[in-house]
Amino acid sequence: MVATDIPAPRDGMLRRISDALMRRPRLFLFLLLGPPLLWLGIVYVGSLIALLAQSFFSIDEFTGLVKYEFTLKTYGELFRPANLDIIIRSVLMAAAVTLTAALIAFPIAYYAARYARGRWKALFYIAVTLPLWSSYLVRVYAWKLILAKEGILNWFIAKAGLTPVLDLVLSIPVIGGPSLSISYIGTYLVFVYLWLPYMILPTQAALERVPNSLIEASADLGGGPGRTFRSVILPLALPGVIAGSIFTFALTLGDYITPQIVGISTLFLGQAVYTLQGTAGNIPLAAAFSVVPILIIAVYLTVARRLGAFDAL
Amino acid sequence: MASALPAAGTRDRGFTKMSKALRIAAATLAASSLAMPALAQMDAVGEGEGQVDIVAWAGYIERGETDKNFDWVTDFEAKTGCKVNVKTAATSDEMVALMNEGGFDLVTASGDASLRLIAGKTVQPVNTSLIPSWGTVDERLQSAPWHTVDGVHYGVPYQWGSNVLMYNTDVFKEAPTSWNVVFEAMDLPDGKPNAGRVQAFDGPIYIADAALFLKAHKPELGIKDPYELNEEQYKAALDLLRQQRQIVSRYWHDAFVQMDDFKNEGFVASSSWPFQVNILQSEDQPIASTIPSEGATGWADTTMMHANAAHPNCAYMWLEHSINPKLQGDLAAWFGSVPAVLAACKGNALLGDEGCATNGEGDFDKIAFWRTPVSQCASNADGCVPYYRWVSDYIAILGGR
């Protein structure tokens, strides 16, 4: 009986290997997953740990050389007013960008998920992803031209007779400036434009998975559109919005090119890391700075989880 | 011209600190070279080895691939049979690292990298008698301290350039004579204030520009060298820059963004490079540049030879080739720099007879060539503020602190 259940070993190298793997599923799994896991472990986690380790060293005040001794001094430096400014500035900007992107993305995603069909759906995907087809740098430079004092947007605003309105907006302290491209408003607009697709796509995916039957049930039970939205659609779509917000939040926190091209030359987190590690040789502080967004995102995810953002997953 | 930008755009990133070990090595080398003859150097150039490997700034060694008018490699290869392999580097640190790694014959090292390479014995002395055209090199550069240590030459000058004060000729009918137009709040000749219409450089090394300004206007501070500042001088420079932050709404970093700012944002004066000035003028913009009375900061590059160069004969042939007037003139036109050979300033079609003057040839004596600020410095016995502090303080200034 046994002889018929387990066939005799077959001929050929490949067949024998195949048979051997079939009999040892664990080995098979290891061979399949090993290389990608190793890559993830060494290249990704490994470099993160190396980074973390660097942040516990400090720079010698006198010689400017890195001292390889454990210390929390470098983290202390993050709380110097100038550095704290950078962190607060980046977080506020990332939060504003994320919130705006979510507000703009939801209706678009809702339309695409629930109403667009066939050709319109294809058009939606193309329209949303089209900006991603061209180079990031080209888009940022293009926005600098659009927002410039003598750029097309200002020309349009002048033609529409809205220049006083723009001047009023630009005269707001802190976020205003001499022109749109030299103000926080400009940086913010470009960020929202850049990261919007990353918000729309996950939101749309989440909305598509909201079953029609639940919405109908809500209506049957007397729920008006507002009630249905608050109690059914939004909670079910929230994981998508949260996923999108992780993209927009993290991407804004880490960006070091846009604020350099459009804005008032104050530094954001990414720029601080870039400046400190490159020419200054202050790797410990750069590493400490790059731990900041990791921590912020971790806190953000924990809060989101507490709020039940992932319950519907 | 676009390919010239990466090098220009990343120049400010080249600063770094000399490690302690290197500094000790430098001191040892300086001491030992008093007693010993110079390190071994070649005494004859033989047959070419068929190739030469060079580490260079982007745009420094062109073979006509970006613009066919700018080619100074093809004829060299045809003439000598040495194939030229170029590895471009974006920062001085990268250049030093590549040279330490080995496998290269030559490097076009800038002011801070060159002394580090000499101190680390990564480069070898150059026998100038094997370079027939050595005598044609600008005398001001022949024994420049960034490649000559104790009378020994460690390289052949390649190109140099300076930062300039770029201004709008519609606003300034006459060239400004002082950097104060970008440092201090004032009304410009057109009667409107300069606030929001001037720029400063977005890099910590700009502190040296402030120091250079103070050197002329606050002699009581006793600044001798803008790269060697004691605490008091340093603090004065920071104060000046903090005050400047009030009138500067944008610091420039990218040459093309700055050009756009001058065209579309109403900026009228800023520190800049001849590169931007040349391009804006070629577009018929009302732009000119000057080096004000205080002088300016600048850079100077040297072609240096690896201590273990595998192709020394081809390397020497390139060193000779690198200072021929045609190459020097073409390169100066391409990069917006000044040739190391003044003969290149005349009769070069690409550069034009005005090219050298435009790029700052006559301003050599006014230029403080850039170096990395280090703690131990010659002009201040108590030590100087090192570069990493320049970085954190400049970040604070940009943030309005």
Image (cartoon, coloured by chain):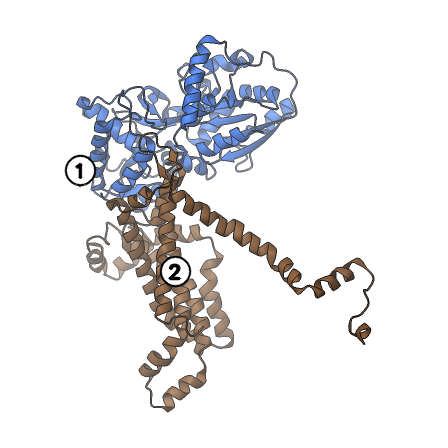
Chain colours: A brown, B blue
Is B137 situated left or right of B263 in this image? right
Vertical order, A72 against B236 (above or below): below
Closer to us: mark 1 or mark 2? 2
Q: Is residue B242 shown to the viewer in this render? A: yes
Report the residue at 44% width, 53% height from top: A136
Amino acid type, mark 2: Thr
What kind of element bears circle 1?
Answer: loop
How far apart marks 1 and 2 lie (CA) works out to 39 Å
Q: Callout 2: residue from which chain? A: A
> Residue A95: horizontal and vertical position, in percent?
31, 60
The residue that mark 1 highlights is B185
> Residue A57: horizontal and vertical position, in percent?
38, 40
The residue that mark 2 highlights is A248
Instruction: Give the mark count.
Output: 2
Return the residue nearer the eye: B12 or B262.
Answer: B12
Report the residue at 29% width, 25% height from top: B228
Return the residue nearer the eye: B178 or B191.
Answer: B178
